[in-house]
Image (cartoon, helix red, strand yellow):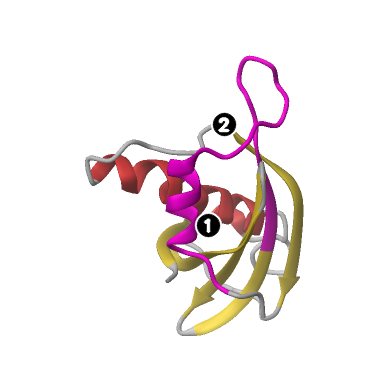
Amino acid sequence: MRYSAKVHVRWDDLDAFGHINNAKYLTYVQEARSDFTWFSRQKAGKKPLLADMVVARAEVDYIEPIYEGGMDVECQIWITRIGNSSFEMEYEIIHKGVIRSRIKTTQVAVSVETKRSRPLSDEEREFLTEYLEEPK
């Protein structure tokens, strides 16, 4: 199963070439990830999860540029690996039915008190497992 979030592309996200600046793609997945683990759960009356995770690694494949601002794109999210304290998320940014980029991040759960990695809770594992897909 994949989670789908709408992410707004602002006019000022466009660069001198008239397409979305490469750094903005990481902002889009950050916003989608926040919706996935926090806001959508909160709206559904569920406890938000993984507010204390950090990005340990990010990879972006730019497939096809987007030449528009002032509209929404779709960001699909799924999980490809769950470890002891880390997990991998993959994303596709889709605009007008076309995959424009694929992104992969490694997330690490961190203790707010110790500022060090911590094991994922059973509740977090259960949530992540709902979206687990084999890597492509």
Q: Quadrant of the C terminus?
A: bottom right
* Mark 2 surroundings within 10 Å by alpha-carbon count, few (fewer than 14), some (14 through 19), many (20 or more): some
What element does badge 2 sit on?
loop
| Image location of residue 9, percent across then percent down | 50, 59
| Image location of residue 29, percent across then percent down | 57, 55
Instruction: Select label 1 or label 2 by which is in front.
Output: 2
The region drawn magenta spans 104-133
What element does badge 1 sit on?
helix
Task: In this rendered view, identify the residue nearer to me: 56 or 118.
Answer: 118
Task: In this rendered view, identify the residue nearer to me: 14 or 134.
Answer: 134
Residue displayed at 48% across by 59% down: 129
**In the image: residue 84, left or right of residue 56:** left
**Mark linked to residue 52:** 2
Task: In this rendered view, identify the residue nearer to me: 7 or 89.
Answer: 89
Residue displayed at 40% across by 41% down: 38
Q: Is residue 30 magenta?
A: no
* Mark 1 surroundings within 10 Å by alpha-carbon count, few (fewer than 14), some (14 through 19), many (20 or more): some
